[in-house]
Amino acid sequence: MTKGIINYSHYLMEEVVNKGDTVIDATCGNGHDTLFLSRHVGENGHVFAFDIQNQAITNTKARLAQNGLTNATIIKDSHSNFIHHMPVDKLTRLGGAIFNLGYLPGSDKSVVTQSETTILAIEGILSHIKQNGIVVLVVYHGHEGGDQEREQLMRYARLLNQELYHVLYYGFINQKNDPPFILAIQKRN
């Protein structure tokens, strides 16, 4: 049975990320992934969630508070600056990261992710992530500039050394209106 894009992105994270790990929600948006990750890593794990929009920060904090979760740090900054916000002890336990690329649903659709900052973030995360750790990108590309972002991310992913990383593409090819897809990058042993 096939899984929807969000369900499959969470499945991939569950398969790799362990209780007690540090994880990154690189685009916290409305807080759904942050909530999922916070529950998954448990009270001994930690989530660092990033977004550049005030609405996303407010929404994510509210969602965590409604669920009584306190193992997350919510940061208003670009995901490309993650390294400046994470203590070394958390960075050494980095098990995974998730990105939802595109724009914040219910917000200003002109504020979109940029492949340049996303690739900077991925590069930094891959240099710190533990063996078998995973970076999951949910790529929504049906917006202004989305085609360019998709192509740059695909080119970047194709060039990753296969001896160091497994790169997975998962998406539905018979859906209309630019369906999102997943790129998952797993660090090999």
Image (cartoon, helix red, strand yellow):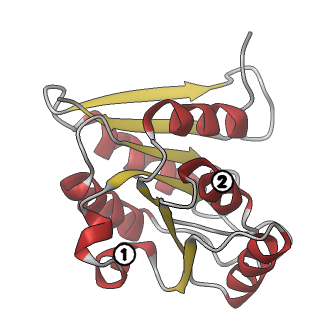
Q: Quadrant of the N terminus?
A: top right
Looking at the rendered image, the quarter that the C terminus falls into is: top left
Vertical side of 75 occupied by 80: above or below = above
Which structural element holds mark 2? helix
| Residue farthest to the top, as pictured | 1
Locate residue 42, reporting x and y percent. Answer: 57, 54
Residue 15: x and y, percent? 50, 30
Q: Nearer the viewer, residue 147 or 102?
A: 102
Residue type at mark 1 is Phe
Q: Earlier in the sequence, mark 2 or mark 1?
A: 2
Left or right, 153 with respect to 160, comes to: right
- Rendered residue at 72%/23% (across/down): 3
Q: Who's the residue at 30% across and 84% down the image?
A: 84
Residue underneath mark 1: 82
In this rendering, the answer to whether 149 lies above or below 18 is: below
On the image, which quarter does residue 186 sit in?
Answer: top left
> Of tags 2 and 1, which is closer to the observer?
2
Q: Which mark is residue 63?
A: none
Give the percent coordinates (x, y) of residue 75: 53, 84
Where is residue 74 drawn, in percent x and y?
57, 80
Residue 179 visible to an observer of this rendering? no
187 shown above or below 147: above
- Label 1 crowd (10 A; few <14 / some 14-19 / many >=20): some
Please name the residue shown 78% across and 27% down the image. Answer: 175
Q: Residue at x 72, y 15 (%)?
A: 2
Judged from the image, the secondary structure of the residue bearing numbered disc 1 is helix
| Residue at image mark 2 | 39
All told, the count of numbered labels is 2
